[in-house]
Image (spheres, coloured by chain):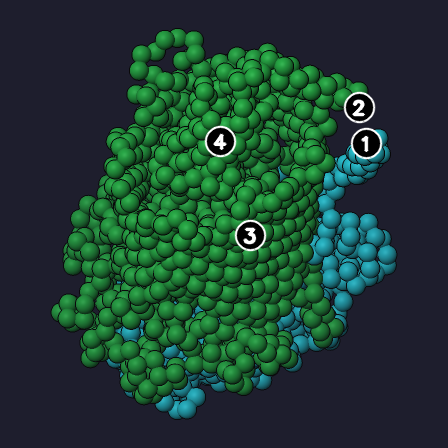
Chain colours: A cyan, B green
Amino acid sequence: MQNLFFKRILLVGFVLTMSIQSCTNLEEELYSDITADNFFKTDEEFIAALGQAYASFGGLGNHGNLWSMNEISSDELVITTKGGDWYDGGILINLHQHNFTSDNDFFNNAWGFLYGGINTANRLIFSFEKLGTPESKVFIAELRAVRALWYYWAMDAFGNVPLVVDFTAKEAPANATRAEVYNFILSELNAVIPVLPTSKDSKTYGRMTKWAALAIRSKLYLNSQVYINQAKWAEAAADAQEIIDKGPFSLQSVYSENFAIRNGGSSENIMVYAYDKVFAGGFNWPMMTLHYASQGVYSLADQPWNGYSVVEEFYNSYIDPAKNPGPQGNVWKGLATAPSTGTLDKRLSNFVVGPQFNPDGSRAQDPGVDAGDPDGTPLNFTPQINQIFPNAWRQGGARIGKYEYEIGGNANMSNDFVIFRLGDIILTLAEAEFRRGNTAKALVLVNQIRKRAGVDAFSSLTLDQIFEERGREMFAEMTRRQDQIRFGKWGGTWWEKPSTAAKTNQIIFPIPKPQLNSNAKLKQNPGYN
Amino acid sequence: MKQRFLKHVFSVLCFSVLAIGMANAQGGKISGKVIDAGNGEGLIGVNVVEVGTSNGTVTDLDGSYTITVGANATLSFSFTGYATQNVVVGNSTTVNISLAFEQQALSEVVVVGYGTQKKKEITSAVTSLKSEDFNRGTVNDPAQLLQGKVAGLSVVRPGGDPNGGFQIRLRGVSTVGANAEPLVVIDGVIGGSLSTVDPNDIASIDVLKDGSAAAIYGTRGSSGVILITTKTGKSGRVTADYNGSVGMESLARKIPVMTADEFRKVPGAPNLGATTDWLDLVTNTSYSQVHNLSLGGGVNNTTFRTSLNLRDANGIGINSGFNQLNGRINLTQLAFNDKATFTVNVSSTTREATYGDANSFRYAVIANPTMPVYDNTTTSPTAGGRFGGYAQRDIFDFFNPLAIAEQNIHDGKDTRLLTSVRGDYSLSDDLRVGVFYSSQWESDFRADYSPKNSKFGGGFGRKGLATKQTNERYNELLEATVNYNKSIGASSNVTLLGGYSYQDFVYEGSYMQGGNFLTDAFTYNNMGAALDFANGLGSVGSYKNSNRLVAFFGRANLNIDGTYYVSASARYEGSSRFGANNKWGLFPAVSAGVTLSNLFELPGVNSLKLRGSWGITGNQPNSSYASLQRFGRQGNFFIDGAYVPTYGPVSNANPDLAWETKNEIDFGLDFAMLDNRLTGTIDYYSRTTKDLILLVDVPVPPNLFGQTLVNIGELSNTGLEAALNYNVVSKEKFSWTAGINLATFKTKVESLTSGDLSFGNGGVLFRAGMGSPGQNNTNLIRVKEGEELGQLWGPVQIGVNPNGTPQFKDLNGDGKFCDCDDDRTVVGQGLPTLTAGINNSFTFGNWDVNLFFRGAFGHELWNSYRGFYENLETTTVNNYNIVNTEYLDQKVTKAQVNSTHVEKGDFIKLDNATIGYKMNVKAGSGVRSLRFYLSAQNPFILTGYTGIDPEVRFTDSENGDPLSPGIERRSTYFTTRIFTLGANLGF
């Protein structure tokens, strides 16, 4: 009996020992996660991988990223401190007033956005090179052009950015000079433009084409004087001319249709990022610019944040008959609660301005209206803003209306974000020709744009007029900062922005502090800490 | 082996025969009764042993015993928690004994990892609490039993949310990257969930404080270990106990804000015509009840205890509370001539909760007091026609507080099942083997609905919004142990333990959220009716992950002459969560103690033990797969007219990811003096946590992803702990026992860098944004290498500028104030330097009184409400109410958080006051005992803090960030005061 029992004990012990041996395995089992080991095995998975190069663009429409950084530091937009709202540690005012400090979160957000895109492109190029199929060669050309676009934005904003092209590099990179990055972008574009697709159809919609690559190169040349201190007007003109002559694009007859909810059919847009409220969120403009009570006006699912306003003098450049001659009619001006007379530029669709009404026709109400605001509780976006800080009126300033807002929409718009379009290219050509001395050709081109806007043609042209026309045409399309720098206006003064003419180093932003801290090889741009 | 076993059997037999042989013919049958000196009740299960023999018995249900002894016999009566008595039998045939309860007795048994030890043998810092030491009143969470009772153990729950969890920290903050909560072991189940145990079923809680004691739990012992032992049945008649109580809870503290009349006097304040006390509207007096019925006993070889616990708790917030039913069966069976013991424990809990919404408190504080509660119109400034008739204002960050609480539904159902089985077998007197298996299953179900007319919670914008989610956690533990226990000579012995442990964890869950309902009738019960899903606007998700821990462990304890004690242990443990190169870690510990009172004559000192210990414990990452390069869904890609999903990197690989280790030394002194009336323990510890597991920014490129989980940095803690207990008066009619425990804390961030990598910017981090409105990008916390953890950071206000903005000090002396970190400084310290618990227990005849005070000192708190709303800024005045503490300066017209919003958090509160009366029970009445009590929790607090609760905040409640202590955020549930009337009935 006892013997038997002990045998049993031994048996149990033995079984236990065996199970112990099989139970020291510490490999991780994955269920809802994927690693390189269990992914990238099928064609669909590779396409999904390519898509990541484009999905990276999804930050374009966010608050606090590349677009915001470029826009609120220009004379187009401002985020005022509305009493207790939107002070945010002063970083918004600092951007507007050109007190650029490297710890401003917007810079680091933008940097992360840009290098996220660059790194994704590098990784995908590496993967497709390893694959080596004919299809992958096409993908690689496309990806190199996408990467060139990221570098163009990065070099434009931060100047001396590190140049990383090898996915397998293990060392943290040092800065490259602005000229080195410029040359890299140029050589990449030169290499891939001949092999990129040229069609404009559903296969190329939202993707890199030869035309988009030409647009990048044209703008690179246009800003050559700024970037490498060497003018390249003829080259800029040549690329713009090729897009206009050979590209499958024409000016959309109605300006605002380029920015409609369903703008996929625009004949003018060269490259877009295809946002969608369901599939590709992140285009948050209704939240960023509209007033709290605009939730009712547009029946929005979410309450807007009342942030971005249009700088009044910029808005006035549309309605001012001296600067922008054209048919006169009722426009909203200053602090007026009734319309007054001004130029009826069709591009006023760029703004939401004046009294706001709910879908049932009732006036939207702002019960929290500031005591000094003459409008009182009925919601009225007056172009004039009383002050930038500390108590800007919450109804102050025209709002961004560039992209059509969907009635019943939510925080994410379905409009496709325009990265390049023909209107920009026409003005690029006009400017390049003007600077080469071909004033007559430039005038024709500018008037082509003015005609579409329903305003009078210019009879003569100055450089300042080209600058202002670009402003009216390209509002909120992330070109203003670049234009102001190229036209020598960046250090100038505008509303609540003192002169920073002496700070010539500020034509590029500081390298963000967190980047400097995580990479000892990175050096700060001149004049910044 | 069998032969040796037989040898042992022989030796025992021989010894017995010898003993009988020596017995004098005068020996005979002795009987008697053992009673409790305190209440005169019979004590069940007292060990009665004839000294020098193995002859013994235990007392029965009435405390009676019968034993046959030899001549000149001495009987020893021993019972856990009572002083052992030896009685020379002489010629008597009846020996009646009353055993006195031994305060903090050194003979007390302490539960340690994988076993028990006598308190006198303990060589590391361990605190043991029995059920009579626990906190009283309405206690719904086992953690609350311990609150303030153990020096160095902080148990906090800011506010009085009945569904809120307690944060537990032992010896301050020892980790900021991994798990900072102590490991809970319930009846041997490692990582047991406190929610599987009802407080009524707990017999004792032991806290392993130092590295040496915790090292046997290696990997998860870094933040301390809490061992919970549930009540078990005792041999003898089956007894039944009923404990029941009803509690009444009311609001204790709130944020002072302007009344409607005060607000109307503020220049420019919009008078909306009504007078509303919002704070009163969103709170109410609530009632709770607790019922516990248990049956326990034992016959032959079986002992059991089974209990049923019913809790119906209601908070002061509208719709906040829960119903909980917990059942437990603990069964022990002896077999094979008592050589084998089988233990089965099963516990099941279901909790149905309604969470209310603490945001109703937040918005009640800031709601304009002249705003009406209801407004069914569509055009007035407070029109609520679209919002179910609740008055609303179309302004930023404001919602009708009552509507938040009444319209939105937040329901939950938690299910817990903890099962364990243990088998032990004595191969010989010295050698015992055991196998243990447990399975713990936890399921949390959450469902929310925001109706179509609810402005808060998304219901209005989304046309009804329903959310449903489940999270399930499952783990299985298998352990095998071998124990060897050998006496050497009269008073020395050696104990050896070896074991193997295997534990497997699985987590899985799903989530769905959709809006656009035709009707509110479904609430969250018909997700398919949400049109969002058809329109692609609904969201659905699910996940599953797992991890595993495997360990080998051993321990040796040596007791030399009952004077010198040495203990050494090691655990070699591997976790699947680490990188391929570093899965395994070794966690050794050594400790030793000497009972000085055995060596020296110390006047007035009954016992004095000096001990020292050293141990290494570890911590693992909070999530699985952290060392792998993973890819995740990264939005969609528009190709060929359709969107396809894209995948990209979401983490970097780190095959070197290794254990975070904590190295701790502890020196302690245990003493008893003045005839054992004064007992105490003093401990000093110093610990260093290295290789913290933190997510560090890395350059992209060369990395794929911008952050990598790495081992980086170092944290150190030092502290002094003291616990004293003094039996002031110990008379039959009156007794008074006073106890105090004190603990000091110091936590320093030694390093945040490692080679090229740095957590934060060059060893400095700014964290914890103040938030919206208007104070985003305004950090409240600085973490700096070489300095203490918990620095509150901000500008220093020195006055008010003519334009109403606060005037700040130019700290860097450049002649102007810059709203940047150059002109900000450390304006407070978020972690306490001292905590204290003070207990006084009295008995007067049948009456008993207990008063327990608890305090924390040296910490400061950011008062967020003041930082946002204590000013006359136009936004505040227009939109909100004004916080109206003694600090309000009407000249300030700009909300800008600064040094004046930091307040001292020092407090001392009467945590609990209980008065009880024990009825005299007539013999034969069928009732064993009956006691009634009245208890008050948090009846008063002494503090200068003007916010909701001066309690310590170990983490930022908005995101759980352990590096950002000391912030009282706005959605804190208000504190409460509870009065409880209860009865304990035994029969």
CA–CA distance in space, label 3 to label 4: 32 Å
CA–CA distance in space, label 4 to label 1: 37 Å
Q: Quadrant of residue B68?
A: top right
Is B936 on the left-hand or right-hand side of B557? left
Confirm whether circles 2 and 1 share one chain: no
User: Residue B2 bears which disc, if any?
Assistant: 2
The answer to whether the residues at label 2 and label 1 have Cβ atoms under 8 Å apart is yes
Q: Identify the element where label 1 is drawn.
A: helix
User: Which quarter shows the N terminus of chain B?
Assistant: top right
The answer to whether the residues at label 2 and label 3 have Cβ atoms under 8 Å apart is no
| Residue B93 position (above or below residue A251) | above
Give the chain letter at badge 2. Answer: B
Q: Amino acid at mark 2?
A: Lys
Q: Quadrant of residue A194?
A: bottom right
Disc 1 designates what residue?
A: A2
Give the chain letter at badge 4. Answer: B
Which residue corresponds to the image point at 46% horizontal and 50% vertical from the top-left? B199
Tell me which numbered mark, 2 or 3, is placed earlier along the sequence: 2
Q: Residue B583: image x %, image y %?
A: 69, 35
Disc number lying in front (4 or 1): 4
Q: Say which of A143 and B195 sits in front.
A: B195
CA–CA distance in space, label 2 to label 3: 38 Å
Is B501 on the left-hand or right-hand side of A424? right
Which residue corresponds to the image point at 44% horizontal and 24% vertical from the top-left? B92
Disc number lying in front (3 or 4): 4
Crowding at mark 1 (Cα within 10 Å: few <14, some 14-19, many 20+) = few
CA–CA distance in space, label 3 to label 1: 34 Å
Crowding at mark 3 (Cα within 10 Å: few <14, some 14-19, many 20+) = many
